[in-house]
Amino acid sequence: MTFRPEDYRAPLEQAVRSAAEWLDSLPSRPVKPAAPVDQLAAAFARALPEEPADPAAVVAELATLAEPGLMAIGSGRFFGWVMGSTLPAALSADWLVSAWDQNGGLRYATPATAAIEERAGAWILDLLHLPASSAVGFTTGGTMANFVGLAAGRGAVLRAVGWDVNRDGLTGAPRVSVLAGAEVHSSVILALRYLGLGEPTLVAADPQGRIRPDALADALATVTGPSLVVLQAGNLHSGSFDRMRESIRLAHDAGAWVHVDGAFGLWAAASPRWAPALAGLDTADSWATDAHKTLNVPYDCGIAIVADPAAARSAFAAHTSYFVRDDAGTADPMDLVPELSRRARGVPVWAAMRSLGRSGTVALVEGLADNASALATGLAALPGVEVLNDVVFTQVSVSFGTDDRTVRVTQALIADGAVWMSGSVWSGRAVLRISVSNWSTDAADVAVAVDAVARALATVTTADRE
C-alpha cells in the first residue's frame, strides 16, 4: 500500500456529509433508537470480505447501517443519566485530533498537543478557582479521574507512615481506611476496587444525599492509620454539594487525604452562583470531573486534578530508556494518568473553553441549572407529580406516587420517544431522574419534555381506569 494524501479526501468528505445529516436530524428525530441491538447486530452480521473496499463507500455503509441504532444523545430533549452533547468547536477539534494522530504521552515527541493540554489545564484551574500549581491530567472519563486522585492519595498517606507502595505494594502495608458519603457514586467504588483498597466505610448523609459533617467527625474518630475521605460535588439524584469547608477541615485535622468526586458538579465552581455552596472546595487534595458531561466535549475526556503534582507523578510516572524527555523538568502528560499511549483528549477541552470564554462557560453552566429548575417547575404543576429533591443544580428526581406507577410512567415516557429520561432508585423510592446536561437544551425543549411527561402520565392514568 502506498500513502497518498488524496486518498483521505473522499472518505473524509463522506464522513462530513454523514455527520451533517445526523446532526441535522437531532432537533426533530425521536430520541430513542429506532432499532434494538439484535436487529443492528443482524445488519452487521456479515463475513469479513475477501477483497478491499472503497473507503468512502465503507464510511457511507457504516453510517447507513448504524443510523437506526443511534440514540439522539446530542438532542436538546435528551435528559438521561448525566450525558452532555458536543459543542461545535469541541467536535471539530476532536476530528483534528484523529487526523493529527498524535500519541499524547510525551512533551518531547508531541509538543503541540502537550502545550494545548497544559494550557487547557491552566484554564480549568483558573475557571474553577483551584490551586494554580495543581497537576491536571486527561483520562478516559470520571472513573479513571477518580482513580488518579485516589491513587495519588493512597501513595501520599502511605508515604506519611513510612510505606512505599510503589516499591513494596500493598501486601503487608498499613490498612488505608476510606470514608465516603452513603450516596457515593459507583465510579468511586470501582476506582477503590482497582486500587486494592476495597469498599469504603459509608458515612451517613442528609435527605439530599450530602455527607453529614457530624457523622464524618464520628467516623474519623474511629480511624487509626492512613485514611482517605471522598466528598461529592454534585449528588447523582439531587445535584447537591457536600459541605466542603467543614468536611475538608475535619478530614485534614485527622490527617486524611480529601478527594472530591465532581463528575458533573465540579463545573459549578465556575459560577459565583454556587460559591457559597462550594466554599472551601479549593482546600481539598484532589478533584475529578468529566468534560464530556457539563462542558459538552466528545467522549473519552475525564479530568483529574491533584493539588500536589509530586503525588500524581509518584503514582503514574514511568521511567525507561526509550522515553525521550525534554529538558524543562515539567511532567509529561503520561506522568499524570494511567496510560502511556493515548489520544490528545485535552485538545477538545481547549477548543470548547476557547470558543466559550469565561463568560460563555459560566453561561453554559448556569443555563443548564436554569433549565433544570424550569423542568422541575413544569413537572410539579402536573397532577400527582412530586419533585423529591431541592433543585440546586442540574438534577431533578420525580415520583408519580407509588413505585409501580413511577416505573410505568417512566416506561411510557421512553416508549413515547419524544424525550429520554432514565429511571432510578433514590432513598428507597423509584424515581424518574432527569439530568440537564446538553448545551443546546432550550425553553422549547423544556416545554416538549413537560408535555411528554404529561402524555406518559395520562397513558398510565387511563390504563389504571380501564
Image: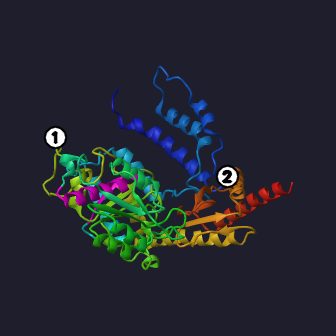
Position above or below: 365 against 64: below
Confirm whether the magenta stretch covers residue 140.
Answer: yes
Give the CA distance from mark 1 to mark 2: 53 Å
Q: Amino acid at mark 2?
A: Ile
Horizontal placement of 52 versus 280: left or right? right
Question: Which numbered marker is on residue 414?
Answer: 2
Q: Identify whether 58 is placed above or below 342.
A: above
**Furthest-top residue in view?**
50
**Residue at (64, 69) in percent of width and height:** 387
Q: Which residue is mark 1?
A: 322
Quadrant for the C terminus, please.
bottom right
Left or right of residue 44, residue 52 in this image: left
Residue 365 seen anywhere in this rendered image of the structure: yes
Asked whether residue 186 is drawn in magenta, I would say: no
Q: What is the three-letter code of the residue carrying label 1?
A: Tyr
User: Residue 375: horizontal and vertical position, in percent?
Assistant: 63, 68
